[in-house]
Amino acid sequence: MKVLVLDDHKPFRDEVVDMLTRLGHEGVGTATAEAAIPLAETGDYDFVLVDFSMPNHDGVWFMKHVKLPRRTKALLVTAHVSKEIMAQMFRLGIAGYLIKPFDESDLIRHLDFHWQRMRRPPQADDPESPAPSAEDAPAARRDSSSTR
């Protein structure tokens, strides 16, 4: 997995990037919402971890201004837990959240959960099921044509 870590607190951001590296994933850190937007919009990332509270522009501003590719999921990372914040961020498109502080097991559990949801085959009767992408189609054809 490749994860963009948007957090203004450098020690926290660096620790999350280090966690991802130890877990065999790639983490890239950035300190501002403005700097994160062009990175997130490239489509190079599977996830963007979005801090809620940042100077200048917060997580709400980021989610309102970013055009995330369909394959990139945003997860809120915050110590500011309130129903209002969560509801607002979900309306803006986050797929889930992690509450600070968290450890490696919390991080990988959340990433794995959302990774599996992104990768599962779409179900016709499941409105939460992601639509297949062009890059998923060849793999699906190979799996269905193989004999076991």
Image (cartoon, rainbow, N blue to C red):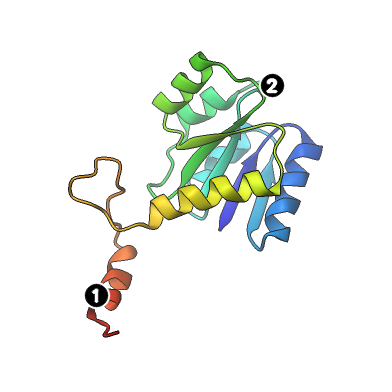
Say the numbered circle drawn on residue 144: 1
Q: Residue at x 69, y 31 (%)?
A: 100
Q: Amino acid at mark 1?
A: Ser
How many marks do you count on the picture? 2
Q: Amino acid at mark 2?
A: Pro
Given residues 13 and 110, the one toward you in this image is 110
Give coordinates of residue 69: x percent, y percent.
41, 46
Eyeballing the image, is 98 above or below 82? below
State if disc 1 and disc 2 touch (CB < 8 Å).
no
Give coordinates of residue 138: x percent, y percent.
29, 72
Q: Residue at x 31, y 48 (%)?
A: 130
> Quick one: SS at disc 2?
loop
Q: Is residue 90 left or right of residue 142?
A: right
Q: Is residue 88 left or right of residue 25?
A: left
Say the numbered circle drawn on residue 101: none
Q: Is residue 62 left or right of residue 79?
A: left
Q: Which residue is mark 2?
A: 55
